[in-house]
Structure formats: structure tokens, C-alpha cells
Image (cartoon, coloured by chain):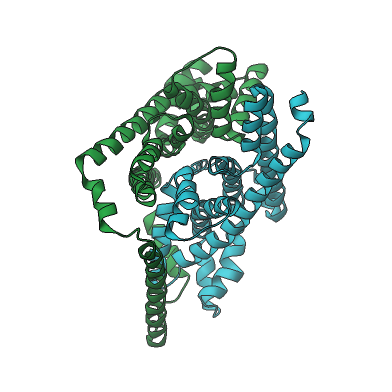
Amino acid sequence: MHAISENIPLLLQGIATTVALTLLGYVFALVVGTVLAVCRVSPIPPLRWAATVYVEIFRNIPLLSLLILIAFGLPDVGLTLPYFWCGVLGLTLSSAAFVCENVRSGINTVPVGHAEAARSIGLGFFGTLRHVVLPQAFRTMIQPLVNVFIGTVIGSSLCSAIAVMEITGVTQRLNIQYAQAVVMFLVAGAVYLVLSLGGAYLGGVLERAVSPSDARRRGPDRALDVQAGAQA
Amino acid sequence: MSARTNTATQVLFDAPGPKGRRRILVLSILSVLVILGVIALGLRQFAMNGELDPGKWVVYLRADYLAFLGKGLMGTLKATAMAAVVAFPLGLLLALGRLSRITPLSAAVACWIEFFRGIPMLLVVYAFLLALPAYGVNVPRFWMLVIPMIMVSSATTAEVFRAGINAVDKGQHEAAAAIGLTPRDSMLHVVLPQAVRLVLPSLILALVSLLKDSTLGYVVSFNELQFQGKTMVSITRYLVQTYVVVSVIYIAINFLLTRIALALDARMKARATGG
């Protein structure tokens, strides 16, 4: 146990780094992903194509390959970022693709009649999206976006492979020092579980808060979502 | 599904008139210019650092380079296939365990599933890498990668199977009970065959996740594609080029698998609604 008590500051720093990586990556991904989703449904063909290509690249590349490419590849082309920001960049690029797909399929769940009604009272593309479609799509997007959050939490561990000292990296180093793998494994595991279960809990609270009361009584939708859990 | 996507996206904006068409054209040209500008900027950055030198890229067409990467790809596919072959049936068993009416069993299985769904695979890999040798257990590198893959993937596929079983119409259960099948027989002969078909697209996507997870062979030094790339970099010093080539291979395979999964899903949905 002294392996933990002697290294509290190091562990706390690792936890803080993990939280920072996750939150920064996720918030940036939400912004970038939403912009991409708007591009994908926009009337401007080149923007649609660009967003599609982006999504296909970044949801299919393994996160570790992406992080290695950013952290070790960018300096070779003359761009040097601190490893922490390489991690944030990698997490953002990867999660944004998943955010985009979820926002887009959320937009598609809003009945076509609502968009038609919005247009018929004179709203344009952005007006329809902002005032009518996105607010309704938001409700169905919460659960998938929570999954993206959990994916970001879990993905942040890979940053230890590019020398970011987040909690996985810290516990791995202490492991080598103290050879108490089981204890360290449980400490780091607890951090990730708290983060991902905490995110899931907040998502649930948010979902109940924005659902209309009739949907609340009907209970959760049991339709099968093929993409659920597709991110890793 | 594609039909619905089209209508929904078309309905967000009116069929443009002459003025709107002109504006869309102008914006299209502008956005093409911006996109090309970004690409040009990136290429310039490559060129300025001499990374665009064709000599550094064409080597990837040489037989020995291809064979080297091919060996890595075989390792990746072997690890992914082995993990899938064990993890998918195990996931089904875990799902049945979680749905079981024996409360202690279902609670224990639920804890197991939630634990491995909530923690990163890298952590499990490190535990294997460092903990087992400490207790004198030595497993080959292949299994150091594949066993964590199995543990994590079986937990996620268990949830996939559970969703599939729950998505089978309740009437099927009742009909099976009505003709006198025991709960076990109705699950085995009526519900499961339908559930497995329902989750087939999700299983293909789970394969994509497994393929991505196999990159952690980089950490345990197992000869899969990402690690083979690392070895190649240490020999040739063509860092950007190697990792770009490796990433493109991953993207191509995963793109294909994702396409197949989504097409299968769309076909099954069309059949379910169209009758």
C-alpha cells in the first residue's frame, strides 16, 4: 500500500492529466463534430464531400496510429506540439468523427414534416437547423454522445503511449518501480470507471431533464442501434 | 436508410432558385479553394522538410518492404481473428448470464461486463505485461495482446448480444411458451437465432474495434502492423512515410468492414419495414 501513499502527488497529477485530456478532447470534438455534421447536411456539395471524407478517415483509423502519427510524425514536417496537446488533438480529431455521425443521425430522426413546416414559415437552412431540428435532435443524441464521451475517456489512456503522463502512464511507471501490478491496476481502473460511469450518470440526468413527460413514461426506446459501442 | 437520409437532408433547404443557385455556386467555389488551400499548406510543410521526396515514398512498392509490412498485417489479422473467435461466443455466454434469472449470477456477470467496458484495454495489457511475470507466469507475446482483447471485446459484444435478444419481439417468447417450449428451449431455438441475425452488423463493427485494439501490439512488441511499422522506422528512418502507409492500410480495411456492416444493416432494416 505504501506504493500509493508515497506517490499521492504523482497519482493526483496523473488523474488531473487524464481529466484534462478527456474534457478538452471531448469539448473540442463536440464543436468540430457539430460543424462537420452541419457541413454534411448543407446545400454546398464540396463541404458535404469534405466532411464525408473526414469522417471516413478518422472513424476508421486506430486512435493509437493517429496519436503516433501526430506526436512523432508532425515534428518531421516541421510542426512541434507538446505531447499533451498532441494527445488532445488526436482525441479531438477521432471523437469529432463519431460526434458528427451521431449528430447527423440525430438530425435524421426528426420527422421530415417539422423541417417542412419550418421552411414553410420562412426559415432558411440555418434557421431550420438551429430553431427546429437541432433542439429536437439533441434529445435523441444524448445517449450516443455519452458513448462518445466514454470512448474519449478510454481513448485518453492511449496518450501514455506517446509519453503523456496520465493515470495509465503513471501507474505503469509505479508498476515497474514497485512491482505491485494488481494494486496499480485497480487504482487506474477505478479512475476510469468513475469518469465513464459519472459521464453516463450525467447523461442520464440530462436526458430525463429534456425529455417530454410522455416519452419519460414510455421508457427508453428499445430499437437496436448498430453503431452503439462502435467506438474504441 | 439512404432514401430517408436524402429526404431529410434535402428538406432542410428549399430547392434553390436562380439567386440561391448562384450563392451555392459561389460558396462551393470558395470552399473548394479553402480546402485546396489547406491541402496545399500541408503539402508545402511536407515539401519544405524534404518529406515529399519521391524516393522516400516509392520504396513502399518494393517487394521486400511490402513483405515486411505484409508480415505485420498477417499478425494483425491473426490476432484479430483469434480474439473474435473466442470473444464473440464468450460475449454471447456473458449476455445470457446477465439475462439469467439467477440473481447472483446475473449481478456478477453485470459487474464483470461493466468493469471491462469502462476501463481502457491498455490498462489490461499493462497488467498482463507486468503482473503475470511477477508471479512467474510467462505467456507468449501473442497472448499478451489477444487475452486483453478477448476480455474487453467479450464485455462489449455481451452488450451487443443483450440488445439483440431484447430487440426480438416479445411475442416470439410468448408463442414459444404457448407451444410448450421450456424457457431454455425457447431461448435456444426461437429467440437466439433471430437475435444473432439482428446483431450481425454490430458484430462486424465489433471486428473493426478489435482491429483497432490490435494496434496495442505496439506496446507489447507483438509483430502486428503498427509494431512492424515501428521496427521499419528504426531501420529506414522514414518515419512519416511508414506511419502514413500503416494508417492508410488500417483505414482501408476498416472502411471496407464499416461499409459492409452499414449496408447489411440497411438491407435488414429495409426488409423489416418493407416486408
Say which quadrant the C terminus of chain B sits in: top left
Q: Chain B is drawn in which colour?
A: green
Q: Where is residue B99 in the image (x, y as percent from the top left)?
A: 58, 24
Q: Can residue B179 be seen in this view?
A: no
User: Residue B228 lies in what quarter of the image?
Assistant: top left
Q: Seen from this angle, which residue lies furthest left?
A: B63
User: Residue A129 lies in what quarter of the image?
Assistant: bottom right
Q: Where is residue B56 in the image (x, y as percent from the top left)?
A: 29, 53
Q: Seen from this angle, which residue lies furthest bottom?
A: B19
Judge by depth and name the residue closer to the eye, B171 or A68. Answer: A68
Q: Where is residue B165 in the image (x, y as percent from the top left)?
A: 50, 30
B34 sits to left or right of A141: left
User: What residue appears at the point 37 percent right and 79 percent down from the top-left corner?
Assistant: B29
A163 sits to left or right of B209: right
User: What residue appears at the point 40 percent right and 45 percent down from the top-left corner?
Assistant: B269
Judge by depth and name the residue closer to the eye, B155 or B226. Answer: B226
Q: Is residue A85 visible?
A: yes
Q: Where is residue B79 in the image (x, y as percent from the top left)?
A: 39, 28
User: What residue appears at the point 56 percent right and 18 percent down from the top-left corner?
Assistant: B132
Judge by depth and name the residue closer to the eye, A185 or A223. Answer: A185
Q: Seen from this angle, which residue lies furthest top?
A: B136
Q: How many labels does the image show?
A: 0
- For the colour cyan, the matching chain is A
